[in-house]
Image (spheres, helix red, strand yellow):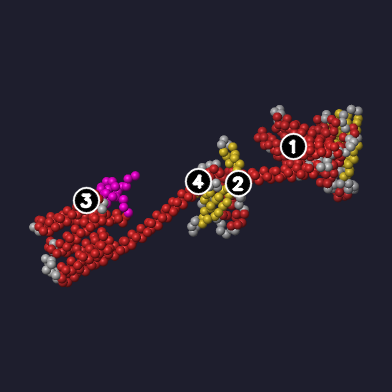
Amino acid sequence: MSNPRNTGSHGLLYNLLTSGTFDSYEISQRSRIIFLNTVIFVGVFTLTLFSAISFSNGNLPLGLSTTSVALVLIFGFIFIRLTHRFVVGDYIASQSIFLLYCYLYLSGGEQGSGVLWLFSYPLIALFLHRIRTGSLLSGLLFVIMLLGLFHPGIGSWDFQLQYGMRIIGSYLFIYIFGLIYEMVREATQRSLAETNTELSRIASELSQEKIQSDAIFKNVQEGIFVMDDQFRVLPTYSSFLESLLETDSIDGESLPDLIGGYLTPRNAESLRDYLPMLLNDSLNPDLIQDINPLEEVQLGIPVGDGDLRQKTLQFRFIPMKTGADQQQILTVVYDVTARAELAARMSAEQHRHQRDMETLFQVLHVDPQLMAEFIEDTEQELDSINALLRNKQLSIPETLTAIFQSMHSIKGNALLLGLEELGITLHHLEQHIKDIQELANPDWRDLLQLTADLGEIQQAIEDTSAIIQKLVTFQTASAEAGLSQAGLLERAIRRIAERESSLAGCPATISFFGFELLTDRLRRPIRDILIQLIRNSFAHGLESPEERQRVGKPETAVLQISLQKTGSALTLRYRDDGRGLDPDRIRAKATRLLPEKAGLPDTEIIRLVFHPRFSTAEDTDLSAGQGVGLAFVHARTAELGGHIRIYNKPGIGFQLVITVPG
């Protein structure tokens, strides 16, 4: 864009006054050029006017002298216009004016006015030649004035002494005024020059620092930015920040708005509460840093077509004061995803090794046959679960119920062997399934997440099975000789009864009868049924020793299990001497869960304990509360083609009779 001073009528005048240099020179030199050309223009105009007056009055010498000086000034203007040698132009103008003023002073000029011209010379000389040369020229003219005053014969006029002294005084006053002005002006210019030099140096340093900071912001592998007191991101930030947050819409955004959608609701709310604390001077800075909610936080950042990229970022906030009442927050963001993933893998590996060691110690003394059966049964249950997931004919609720029962069976078998860690893992999966079942309309996405969890469970089971398989191979050679299948089953059932007794704090004895009648076909389902019944007894039926004493029962509870062959059928009787089933309690629970069943008679209401997800337990733990134990018993009995009868005496005991084809 052109400078407006370089165009139009103003541009022409500026062109003439600067000799066509415009703004090529610094301001002090430019002002001298403009003053020199102004003196020339005014001088030429004035001298031309007075020369015409002199010629018209017949004063030929004065007219010729003024005309000559006017021509010299015109020559000087052309010379400096063409050569830009302004120092020469200064001398041409000042010396020609000096000679003219001397002539006018000595000749008297028109009607004695020549002396009036002298008063302008100190200003011209000082401004064009500065203090030293300007003072020398002004002093030389002053000497000539003194000679003309005290030697009247030199000049053609005759002044009275008093009048001449006034002229001398006026000249000196104007010289001193011009000298002071020039001294102040030069001092000001020197100060401005020094200031400009310092500003240039600072600007250069700032420019270098900006280049360096831009290079740092461009190449640094951290997200660096500054927020104002409204927590908005200021324009200057590192390029890596855009890569971290997968967006280029950062400038001016509020940090809570920028990343709040990627955080959990709890973390987003904590961030909004935390940021104002950084600007509160009354709070302990160390404490504020310690409660940073983004010290290490996982963000799910959208990328591509709705995909989420999981990143673990670490935010560091540093409050800064930028003025009396202005505060900003320097923020540095580190991508610690790789470190967090490594830590997670190391933790998982450590947990896996710990779990393997615990598994090893837990099953070290377990009978090899029992461990082999656990592997076989677990593989069958997992195959069953995979078949359920592929079965498109079942509804999602039916699939979830079947998976729940299989998981419950695996958990029971794991606890039978004392695999506590695996049992806890399976218990958590059961809780997840239960949460999905409680949804109003579970869909395939819920089932997909469950499939991922089942994959982790399957891996844990495979790891456990691998350890058990090694122990089976090792221990088979030293297994107890001659131990029958019935003896193995009795020992396994006794083992889980002892475990449940210890957990419940309820001592109990258990007796077995007729287990030699079990066939290979029935051994596994009967074992699964008995595991659930024993756990159910200790969770719901058997009282604590103190309670048993209060009601007149022995402190040690009694469990009785018997098998009896009747024709082609096999009857399993399971009995405990606990508190039995409480119809009123079952009815109260039915009122909430199955209101249409709440009006059944006592003999029918107690059969609701076989309903899936029906439990009278208030809390959920490894032993009870999921509402699947007796439902599992009912399902296994139905698979065998059998039926169940309940004999219940509240406060005295409970007996379950299961009859299945032999």
The residue segment tinted magenta is: 1-26
Q: Secondary structure at mark 2?
A: loop
Report how far apart the C-alphas of labels 2 and 1 lie in the structure: 32 Å
Residue at which label 2 appears: 336
Nearest the eye: 460 or 574: 460
The residue that mark 3 highlights is 78
Q: Report if the CB atoms under discs 4 and 2 are less than 8 Å apart.
A: no
Callout 1, which amino acid?
Answer: Glu
Classify 10 Å Cα crowding around label 3: few (below 14), some (14-19), many (20 and above). some
Query: Which x, y percent locates residue 178?
Result: 26, 63
Considering depth in this image, is 136 or 256 the residue closer to the camera?
A: 136
- Relative to 387, is 50 above or below? below
- Label 4, label 1: how far apart the Cα atoms are: 49 Å
Which image quadrant is residue 340 in?
Answer: top right
In depth, the one of 174 and 559 nearer the eye is 174
Secondary element at tag 4:
helix
Looking at the picture, which amino acid does disc 4 mark? Lys
Label 1 belongs to which residue? 462
> Marks 1 and 3: which is nearer the front?
3
Q: Residue 459 in the image: state x and y as whole percent.
A: 72, 37
